[in-house]
Image: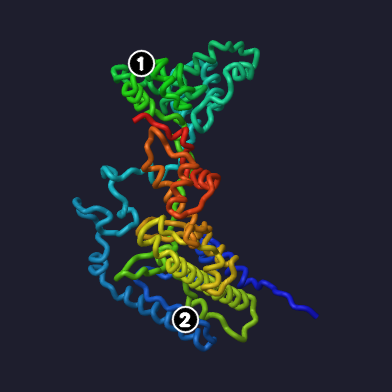
């Protein structure tokens, strides 16, 4: 004798739908609509009836009779139409000043015209281009011998996503067939031609060369151009370490002059290859919408992101209770699966609403005042409030997004650990990150705040945080150390 828990197919389906994002759920719903004839989508403006249309054979018979009758009436009416009536309904020839879309409404009519300034067909339909294909396209337009073209293709293959040449010219030259008799000078000459391609700075072997290539493509009449070229060629290491006193002494420039030179260098792109984006854009569709109405925060599902489904009453009416034929068994199974799928969707929506409502209830301060008012929150708190397991809350908050007046956030963003305060209270780690970001934004750029100094400022506000914790939070925010944040005023 013993007890065990068995997960039924319905429960497995509900759990799987619960952890899907909105885009994945839409794809899952589309696959269910294509595979199950019993499921149908509610169209816009259609009265939605989600009642169970399971009927007896006696109930299904009138449905077929009504359809036959309506078909006969339509046929008889069409036979009684005169030729003049048909001519009025379908014109034989369109007027000269009438567009096709004015007579027949098609999906193409919703597209902007080709001469519309706001319409960009490429950005809406093209797939992201890789850096190599972009360079090869320019190579095909350049007059070049077969040997030089072979060298150019090899060099382009050695350029990484950032736009830098990964292999040395000696290694590339040694990789060619000895019978071709390709010398190192030929490889260098072809590399110089590739370095004239777009984007500017492509094919560089180091950061200094990359910046120098970009400076050479700028007008020579720009002020401080010669000093900027000398800076990136001879003193790039001092610029990286922000040793401004050494730079002023070696380049014989005053502080104001050096600042203008550095400002010119900062207009360049140290990663030119990143301008060519080959990855597909990723879109975020919010699952929950939060808005304020009469000083109350309201939570509602994004109905446009989740299509509403129902069981097709016509096909469900064909299912006969006492029939054991193969067709009837198939329709019965499809009807049962459609019921389970709709019930799983409803369960997902209800669980999502419960969790989102509790999150908004806990984080009213964030919605009113921002990140600094975020309260500590863990999965256990929400699980107790809604009466569910923490694993269920984790599934609900993964890849689910909430649209708020402050922006779109993943539900996991509202969960954070706590840090003790001097008064015995608790402060959210998200709030501490927001305070650190605010302190760094207001610091003196000549003397940026160190991690120890930030920890002291937080302690003055009653927040007890160690220096290593401040460093961890600073790195998570993408803020550089104090030595790299130093600037010339």
Name the mark on residue 30: none
On the question of residue 138 being in view, the answer is yes
Residue under pointer 2: 51
Outermost residue, bottom side? 58
Q: Residues within 10 Å of mark 2 (few under 14, many from 20)?
A: few
Q: Nearer the viewer, residue 467 or 282?
A: 467
Q: Position of residue 27 (x, y in %)?
A: 51, 59
Residue at (53%, 30%) from the top-left corner?
Answer: 160
Residue, x 57% and y 18% (percent of image)?
A: 169
Q: Which mark is residue 226?
A: 1
In the rendered image, the vertical position of residue 307 relative to residue 240, given as above or below: below
Which quadrant of the rendered structure holds the C terminus?
top left
Residue 333 horizontal/vertical position (percent): 60, 75
Vertical position of residue 374 compared to residue 435: above or below: below
Can I make out residue 22 in this image? no
Q: Residue furthest right?
A: 1
Q: Position of residue 280 (x, y in %)?
A: 47, 45
Front residue of 347/64: it is 347
**In the rendered image, the vertical position of residue 269 relative to residue 32, given as above or below:** above
Gap in angstroms between the C-alphas marked 1 and 2: 78 Å
Q: Is residue 147 above or below residue 465?
A: above
Near mark 1 (Cα within 10 A), the count class, few <14, some 14-19 or many ≥20, is some
Identity of the residue drawn at 63% across and 19% down: 175
Of the image marks 1 and 2, the number of the one nearer the N terminus: 2
């Amino acid at each position: 004798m013993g007890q065990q828990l068995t997960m039924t197919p319905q429960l497995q389906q509900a759990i799987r739908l619960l952890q899907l994002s909105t885009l994945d759920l839409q794809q899952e719903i589309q696959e269910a609509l294509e595979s199950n004839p019993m499921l149908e989508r509610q169209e816009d403006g259609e009265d939605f009836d989600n009642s169970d249309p399971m009927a007896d054979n006696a109930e299904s018979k009138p449905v077929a009779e009504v359809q036959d009758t309506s078909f006969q009436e339509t046929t008889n009416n069409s036979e009684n139409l005169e030729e003049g009536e048909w001519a009025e309904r379908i014109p034989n020839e369109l007027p000269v000043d009438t567009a096709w879309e004015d007579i027949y409404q098609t999906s193409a009519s919703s597209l902007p015209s080709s001469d519309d300034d706001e319409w960009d067909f490429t950005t809406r339909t093209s797939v992201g281009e890789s850096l190599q294909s972009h360079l090869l396209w320019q190579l095909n337009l350049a007059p070049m011998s077969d040997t030089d073209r072979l060298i150019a293709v090899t060099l382009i293959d050695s350029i990484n996503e950032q736009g830098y040449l990964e292999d040395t010219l000696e290694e590339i030259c040694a990789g060619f067939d000895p019978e071709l008799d390709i010398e190192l000078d030929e490889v260098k000459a072809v590399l110089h031609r590739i370095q004239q391609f777009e984007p500017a700075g492509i094919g560089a072997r180091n950061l200094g060369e990359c910046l120098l290539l970009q400076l050479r493509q700028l007008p020579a009449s720009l002020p401080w151009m010669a000093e900027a070229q000398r800076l990136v060629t001879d003193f790039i290491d001092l610029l990286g370490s922000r040793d401004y006193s050494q730079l002023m002494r070696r380049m014989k420039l005053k502080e104001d002059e050096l600042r203008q030179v550095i400002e010119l260098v900062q207009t360049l792109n140290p990663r030119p290859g990143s301008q060519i984006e080959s990855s597909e854009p990723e879109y975020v569709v919010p699952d929950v919408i939060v808005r304020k109405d009469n000083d109350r925060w309201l939570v509602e599902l994004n109905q446009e992101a989740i299509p509403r489904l129902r069981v097709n009453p016509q096909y469900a009416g064909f299912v006969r209770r006492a029939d054991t034929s193969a067709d009837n068994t198939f329709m019965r199974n499809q009807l049962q699966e459609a019921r389970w799928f709709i019930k799983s969707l409803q369960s997902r929506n209800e669980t999502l609403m419960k969790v989102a409502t509790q999150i908004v209830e806990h984080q009213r301060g964030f919605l009113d005042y921002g990140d600094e008012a975020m309260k500590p929150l863990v999965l256990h708190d929400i699980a107790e409030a809604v009466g569910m397991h923490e694993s269920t809350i984790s599934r609900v908050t993964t890849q689910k997004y909430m649209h708020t007046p402050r922006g779109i956030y993943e539900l996991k963003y509202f969960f954070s650990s706590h840090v003790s305060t001097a008064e015995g209270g608790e402060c959210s780690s998200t709030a501490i990150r927001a305070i650190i970001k605010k302190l760094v934004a207001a610091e003196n750029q000549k003397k940026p705040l160190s991690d120890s100094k930030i920890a002291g400022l937080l302690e003055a506000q009653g927040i007890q945080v160690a220096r290593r914790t401040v460093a961890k939070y600073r790195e998570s925010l993408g803020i550089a150390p104090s030595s790299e944040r130093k600037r010339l005023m």
